[in-house]
Image (cartoon, rainbow, N blue to C red):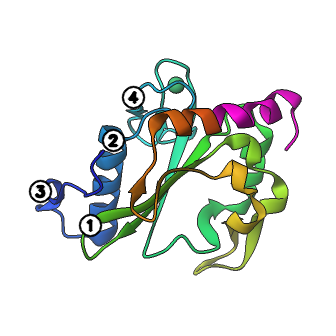
């Protein structure tokens, strides 16, 4: 597993958010395996609402969130209403969370949060709407509210973990999904 992004891919891009999206998505596609079965993950084309990546072997869906510098306490997400609706639905994805160092274009942390750890209690509405759309409420995912067993690291502080350990950690959480509670 390589920890650096392939910056050759973004020479043509000017916009920083676009660069980051290309670099992080490419990295996940090349380096990350499905924590449920160990297969490679594939990328959905054209912004599927169910997620960014999927496993063609076991059909788990994954949404990628990324953040620079440090993991912090919260992940900023999209619409609060949409997020709550997704939690109720069958198609709620698991979350990949990538934390990177922009100076060296390097991954600091990468983890997966299984979907059964997402409950309405950890989805926090943000106070301010966005300009021109005051009623559109965004949300954050409160990482502090997720137990340690729900944060399965592939890379922690630039240290890679073994595939066997990651698959094992994932399997240990599955009883929560089956019992339908978190
Ligand atoms: Zn799989």
Question: On the image, which quarter does residue 3 sit in?
Answer: bottom left
Residue 8 image label: 3
Residue depicted at 54% across the width and 70% down the height = 71
Question: On the image, which quarter does residue 6 sit in?
Answer: bottom left
Q: Is residue 155 above or below residue 114?
A: below
The secondary element bearing badge 3 is classed as helix
The first of marks 2 and 1 along the sequence is: 2
Report, in whole angstroms, how far the alpha carbon at label 2 lies from the one at label 1.
15 Å
Disc 3 versus disc 1: nearer the observer: 1
Report, in whole angstroms, how far the alpha carbon at label 4 lies from the one at label 3.
23 Å
The secondary element bearing badge 4 is classed as loop
In the picture, the quarter occupied by the N terminus is top left
Predominant secondary structure, magenta span? helix
The first of marks 2 and 3 along the sequence is: 3
The range drawn in magenta is: 170-182
Residue holding disc 1: 105
Residue holding disc 2: 31
The secondary element bearing badge 1 is classed as loop
Report, in whole angstroms, how far the alpha carbon at label 3 lies from the one at label 1.
11 Å
- 56 vs 29, left or right, is right
Image position, residue 77 (x, y; %): 60, 63
- 152 vs 52, left or right, is right
Q: Is 46 included in the stretch rendered in magenta?
A: no
Badge 1 vs badge 4, beta-carbon distance below 8 Å: no
Residue holding disc 4: 40
């Amino acid at each position: 597993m390589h920890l650096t992004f392939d910056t050759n891919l973004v020479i043509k891009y000017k916009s920083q958010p676009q660069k980051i999206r290309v670099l992080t998505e490419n990295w996940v596609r090349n380096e990350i395996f499905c924590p449920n079965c160990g297969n490679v993950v594939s990328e959905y084309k054209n912004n599927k609402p169910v997620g960014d990546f999927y496993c063609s072997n076991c059909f788990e869906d994954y949404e990628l969130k990324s953040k620079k510098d440090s993991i912090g306490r919260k992940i900023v997400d999209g619409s609060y209403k949409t997020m709550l609706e997704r939690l109720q639905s069958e198609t709620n994805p698991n979350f990949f969370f990538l934390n990177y160092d922009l100076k060296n274009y390097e991954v600091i942390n990468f983890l997966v949060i299984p979907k059964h750890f997402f409950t309405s209690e950890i989805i926090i509405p943000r106070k301010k709407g966005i300009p021109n759309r005051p009623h559109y409420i965004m949300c954050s995912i409160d990482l502090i509210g997720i137990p340690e067993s729900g944060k399965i690291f592939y890379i922690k502080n630039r240290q890679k973990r073994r595939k066997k350990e990651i698959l094992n950690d994932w399997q240990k959480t599955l009883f929560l999904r089956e019992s339908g509670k978190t």
